[in-house]
Amino acid sequence: MQLVDTHLHLDSDDFGDREPEIVARAREAGVVAMISVATSAASSRRVLKLSRRLPGVFPAVGIQPNDVVEASEEDWKLIEQLVLEYRDEIVAIGETGIDCYWDRTPLPQQRDFFDRHLRLAREHDLPVIIHMRESGQEIVEALRRAWGSHHGRAVMHSFTGDRSLLQQCLELGLYISFAGMVTFKKSEDLRDVARAVPLDRILVETDSPYLSPEPLRGRRPNEPARVVHTARCLAELRGTSLDEFARQTTANAVRLFGDILPPYQSRQSSQAST
């Protein structure tokens, strides 16, 4: 069995300096690739460095919407510079998006930075990792404005929307990724949505160190090895085996992020300083 954790924050302080053992546990559990997603300019530097030290870990760079309020123009220029210089290493732009739950970054500022990320991804032919929280319709409308009829490649990470939002996302060509919340006992509505995602559009993630799945809910930090619990839950509710579900979601991840399966290619700029 081979699984891909399509969204985690390996540079989080929750992990301290234990990243190698966390990645080793993930591999033992069958997780062969992990997308380490940045949340700020400084985080983007860190995920690049981690990806060079740890085979099977791949970086996504960007500024998360709740962090945009603290971002300067210099921070954004750094993101652009990193993508320009390390395009062969970076597998996605993000995470970006819109968050209407936390009242940290004003909506106009979030929309501006979301558009910037979308343009950057298009310029460099990279997929986008989209953060959503009580903002699904805002995001759909932003994508329609930005993309028009020429849809880009993107994933709605840690999806929590309803069937109507799912349909709109599918019409835009988005992949739909589920984290530990889909395993929670009171998440039957979300599981109902997960049943409706086409097999070639579904992905799995941990969003670690957050959102530990059942039966480990509440135990922090979450880590990529635990994506197996989420995959098993999704396989069972869709009436398929874990092995088959893993095969399909891994194929989907490769289609979105590129060649991320072993044997891993060496980093062309591994000696460069970020």
Image (cartoon, rainbow, N blue to C red):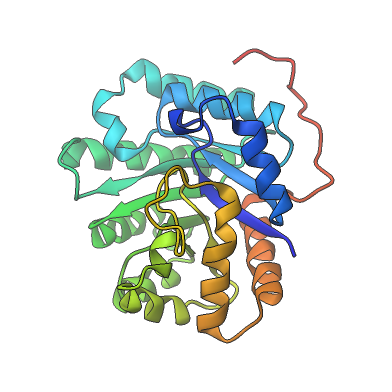
- Image coords of residue 106 (percent x, y): 16, 37
Quick one: quadrant of the N terminus? bottom right
Residue ID at (62%, 83%): 240
Residue ID at (41%, 55%): 147
Q: Quadrant of residue 251?
A: bottom right
Please say if 110 is above or below 258.
Answer: above
Quick one: quadrant of the C terminus? top right
Tell which residue pokes out farthest to the bottom in this image.
Answer: 239
Please say if 262 is above or below 249.
Answer: above
Left or right: residue 162 compared with residue 245? left
Q: Quadrant of residue 272?
A: top right
Give 7 or 168, whichever is nearer the viewer. Answer: 7
Residue ID at (41%, 68%): 182
Tell which residue pokes out farthest to the top in this image.
Answer: 273
Give 229 or 98, whichever is nearer the viewer. Answer: 229
Left or right: residue 195 compared with residue 252? left
- Image coords of residue 242 (percent x, y): 65, 74
Left or right: residue 13 compared with residue 143? right
Residue ID at (67%, 71%): 248
- Image coords of residue 134 (percent x, y): 23, 58
- Image coords of residue 159 (percent x, y): 39, 62
Residue 217 visible within the image: yes
Count of residue discs: 0
Residue 142 visible within the image: no
